[in-house]
């Protein structure tokens, strides 16, 4: 079932492990995630979007292999995982399938867009803690430990992203701005940014139904003191009447491995937050609009990270 997204590790981390442009396996990723939405200046809630055929819920599990010219990888789960018996069809004997939309091999037959659920407990039951082994034919296998349950994610990432905004007005779950004025967006600090193997902060502004306006990220190995992101949208950048999704994610990389030559392999936990930004000529006149009715737009696949 569909989860929210994954992280953009491959291109930014490639230099750390010596990936070349000719390597066929670029990355192997295993992780769990929590998706949230911000509804006013101080409130972040778990994404309430109802499940559908392609979206399982705000809590996610990811197994992903990125590369070119590969045969179907397989994943062996720890012994306490119940998904092989609870849903043998989706488990597909652990064989990943190619997802052309995301250009990756991913878990979860028949859509192969990974797995989402309505609770952290469900993810932890289906996909237990322990060692996950991903085998890529010809290239070998990598063992990745995922020893913290999703229910305990706050012990690894104490706070989901929370945005501080200036230049507009919150109303019913949407932030309204005058496109002729500047808008400054700043996240809270990622307190555990330098913990574990590494930390990662991802940030983007996406035109709903259109192009990405901005994307930026920090890794603790490259930017050890940059534990938050701030970004200003200049006057005249936004289009009146257009809606945008602003997104940030804090990820803790629990383990890094290079058992598969020239490829990054990593296990992670991630907490993300998104909100809707609406460009209107006079934001104060939109107080009666209901923003929560369009929260489903935050369920979109970002261009990077598993």
Image (cartoon, helix red, strand yellow):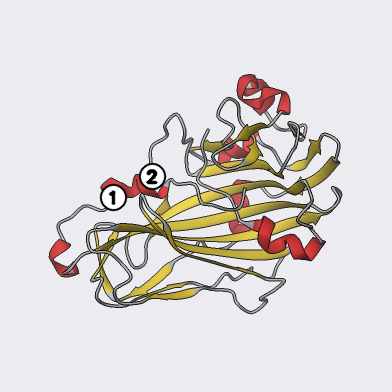
Q: Quadrant of residue 104?
A: top right
Badge 1, how many Cα within 10 Å: few under 14, some, many 20+? Answer: some
Compared across the picture, whether 301 is left or right of 123 comes to: left
Specify whether residue 76 is in view: no
User: Residue at left 78%, top 56%?
Assistant: 256
Residue 121 showing in the rendered view? yes
Coordinates of residue 80 in the picture (x, y in percent)? 73, 33
Quadrant of the rendered image containing residue 232: bottom left
Would you say 175 lies left or right of 58 here? left
Sequence order check, earlier mark of 2 and 1: 2
Q: Which residue is mark 1?
A: 292
Q: Do the residues bearing badges 2 and 1 touch, measured as CB atoms within 8 Å?
A: yes
Indicate whether 56 appears above or below 281.
Answer: above
Identify the residue at image location x=36%, y=44%. 296
Residue 119 image position (x, y, % from top left): 51, 40
Q: Nearer the viewer, residue 290 or 259?
A: 259
From the image, tell me which residue sits under label 2. 48
Quick one: label 2, few (<14), some, or many (20+) residues within 10 Å? some
Question: Which quadrant would residue 126 be assigned to in this image?
Answer: top right
Q: Residue at x 45, y 53 (%)?
A: 36
Residue at image point 70% right, 73% down: 222
- Find numbered disc 2 in the image and state the secondary structure of the residue it sits on: loop
């Amino acid at each position: 079932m569909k989860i929210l997204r994954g992280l953009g590790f491959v291109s930014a981390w490639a230099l750390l492990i010596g990936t070349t442009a000719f390597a066929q396996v670029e990355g192997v990723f295993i992780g769990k995630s929590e998706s949230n939405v911000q509804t006013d200046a101080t409130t972040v809630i778990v994404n309430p979007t109802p499940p559908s055929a392609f979206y399982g819920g705000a809590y996610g599990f990811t197994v992903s292999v990125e590369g070119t010219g590969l045969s179907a990888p397989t994943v062996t789960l720890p012994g306490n995982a119940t998904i092989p018996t609870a849903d043998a069809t989706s488990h597909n004997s652990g064989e990943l399938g190619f997802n052309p939309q995301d250009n990756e091999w991913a878990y979860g037959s028949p859509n192969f867009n990974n797995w989402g659920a309505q609770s952290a407990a469900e993810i932890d039951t289906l996909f237990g803690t322990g060692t996950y082994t991903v085998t890529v034919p010809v290239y070998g296998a990598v063992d990745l430990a995922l020893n913290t349950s999703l229910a305990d994610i706050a012990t690894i990432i104490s706070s989901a992203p929370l945005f501080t905004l200036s230049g507009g007005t919150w109303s019913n779950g949407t932030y309204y701005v005058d496109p002729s004025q500047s808008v400054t967006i700043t996240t809270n600090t990622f307190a555990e940014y330098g913990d574990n193997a590494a930390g990662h902060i991802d940030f983007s502004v996406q035109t709903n139904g259109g192009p990405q306006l901005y994307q930026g990220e920090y890794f603790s190995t490259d930017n050890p003191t940059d534990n938050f992101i701030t970004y200003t949208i200049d006057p005249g950048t936004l289009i009146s009447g257009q809606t945008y999704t602003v997104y940030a994610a804090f990820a803790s990389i629990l383990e890094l491995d290079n058992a598969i030559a020239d490829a990054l392999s990593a296990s992670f936990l991630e907490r993300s937050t998104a909100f809707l930004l609406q460009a209107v000529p006079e934001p104060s006149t939109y107080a009666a609009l209901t923003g929560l009715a369009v929260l489903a737009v935050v369920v979109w696949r970002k261009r990077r990270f598993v």
